[in-house]
Image (cartoon, rainbow, N blue to C red):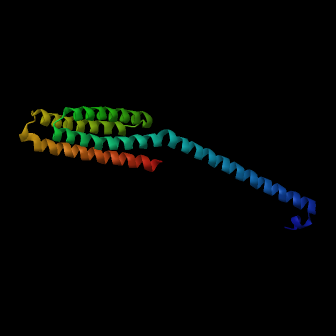
């Protein structure tokens, strides 16, 4: 401390400038590093998580749409609604393939498998009821199986979406 008191005013002012310049330089380096990490994280969100969330939301809505289309087809006896449900199912398969290519994990493939299991039985039941080829003795059991598969699919989709939202 006595060394600082013995310095001339010129050196004291120069020392203040030097310390403040070093402080500014350290602050700038820290900010630059933090901005680089933030930019990298934002790019990941933009390129990976947002598209996954957007496509997952579309899949969730489309699954609900398929349920409505198949119910409508059975109640009205029209095969056009079955065709529209098939088109929606193909859209879901495409979206889940897109998600799998973005995410590079097995979860999207598992969800696609769950969807195919549900849609196979739901489509079969609906078509059989419209055409009159459905075995009515097995209808209750098959409807229970279909309902369980739909519940597992919806639960898995919701969990998948929530996990990807949390990772954002």
Image quarter where the N terminus lies is bottom right
**Side of 15 relative to 42 (left or right):** right
Residue depicted at 34% across the width and 48% down the height: 158
Q: Quadrant of residue 62?
A: top left
- 111 vs 147, nearest the viewer: 147
Residue depicted at 75% across the width and 51% down the height: 25
Residue depicted at 27% across the width and 34% down the height: 84
Rendering coords of residue 154 (x, y %): 29, 46
Rendering coords of residue 81 (x, y %): 23, 35
**Side of 119 relative to 17 (left or right):** left
**Side of 92 relative to 9 (left or right):** left
Residue depicted at 28% across the width and 36% down the height: 113
Rendering coords of residue 63 (x, y %): 29, 41
- 157 vs 122, nearest the viewer: 122
Rendering coords of residue 28 (x, y %): 71, 50
| Image label count | 0
Is residue 22 placed above or below 81 in the rendered structure?
A: below
Is residue 163 placed above or below 112 in the rendered structure?
A: below
């Amino acid at each position: 401390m006595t060394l600082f008191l013995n310095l001339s005013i010129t050196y004291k002012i120069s020392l203040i400038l030097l310390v403040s310049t070093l402080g500014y330089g350290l602050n700038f380096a820290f900010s630059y590093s933090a901005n680089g990490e933030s930019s990298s994280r934002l790019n990941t969100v933009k390129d990976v998580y947002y598209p996954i969330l957007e496509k997952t939301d579309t899949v969730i809505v489309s699954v609900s749409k398929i349920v409505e289309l198949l119910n409508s087809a059975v109640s009205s006896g029209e095969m056009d609604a079955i065709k529209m449900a098939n088109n929606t199912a193909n859209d879901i398969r495409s979206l889940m393939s897109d998600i799998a290519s973005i995410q590079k994990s097995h979860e999207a493939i598992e969800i696609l498998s769950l969807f195919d299991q549900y849609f196979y039985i739901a489509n079969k039941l609906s078509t059989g009821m419209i055409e009159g080829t459905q075995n009515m003795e097995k209808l209750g059991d098959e409807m229970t199986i279909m309902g369980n598969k739909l519940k597992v699919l919806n639960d898995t989709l919701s969990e998948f979406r929530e996990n990807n939202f949390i990772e954002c």
